[in-house]
Amino acid sequence: MVKVISIGAASLALLIGVGYFFTIGFVKPMSTDLSVIGKGKPVLVLAYENYSPDGGEALSRLQKVKGDYHSRLDFVVADLGTPQGFAFADRHKMFNGQAVFLKQNGEPLEVTYIPTNEQELRSQLDSKLATVE
């Protein structure tokens, strides 16, 4: 019985470890570097509060499409738990889970919520990019 429990615990630990390294290796975290704004590439900035369902869900939706847009659009998080992120969100009158699309020169185009439907999100990103390209 002890052997079965030991094998089960070891298998679970291995599975968790593999999942962790898979996530770290293949899902790159969203940058918090707001200094990329105005540097010649459009930027989508998400106002994000740690441990908040709204911000976490919006971040998750953006992570799903980020790979298809990263060559044309920078994705950045304004972490509301930091002075810089809070000041950015305050300046743009953003709340947790909202995003602002900024033109290549840093001028804001629109503050919006991230659509829950992936196709709608892609459509919104395509539309915004079409206005600035």
Image (spheres, helix red, strand yellow):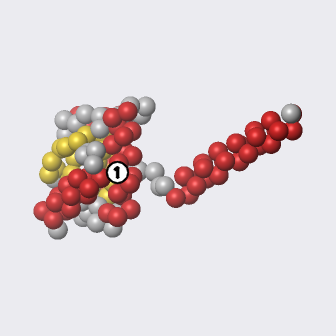
- Residue sitting at x 47%, y 55%: 28
Find disc 1 in the rendering and name its residue: 62
Expressed as whole percent of the image width and height from the top left, the position of residue 94 reads 22, 36
Amino acid at circle 1: Leu
Residue 59 seen from this side: yes
Residue 79 seen from this side: no
- Residue sitting at x 23%, y 53%: 120
- Above or below, comparing residue 131 to residue 86 in the picture: below
- Above or below, comparing residue 27 to residue 52 in the picture: below
Quarter that holds the N terminus: top right
Rendered image quadrant of residue 65:
bottom left
Quarter that holds the C terminus: bottom left
**Number of residues whose C-alpha sits closer than 10 Å to that of mark 1, classed few (under 14), some (14–19) or many (20 or more):** many
Residue found at the far front of this picture? 1
Expressed as whole percent of the image width and height from the top left, the position of residue 89 reads 26, 37
Expressed as whole percent of the image width and height from the top left, the position of residue 43 reads 27, 55
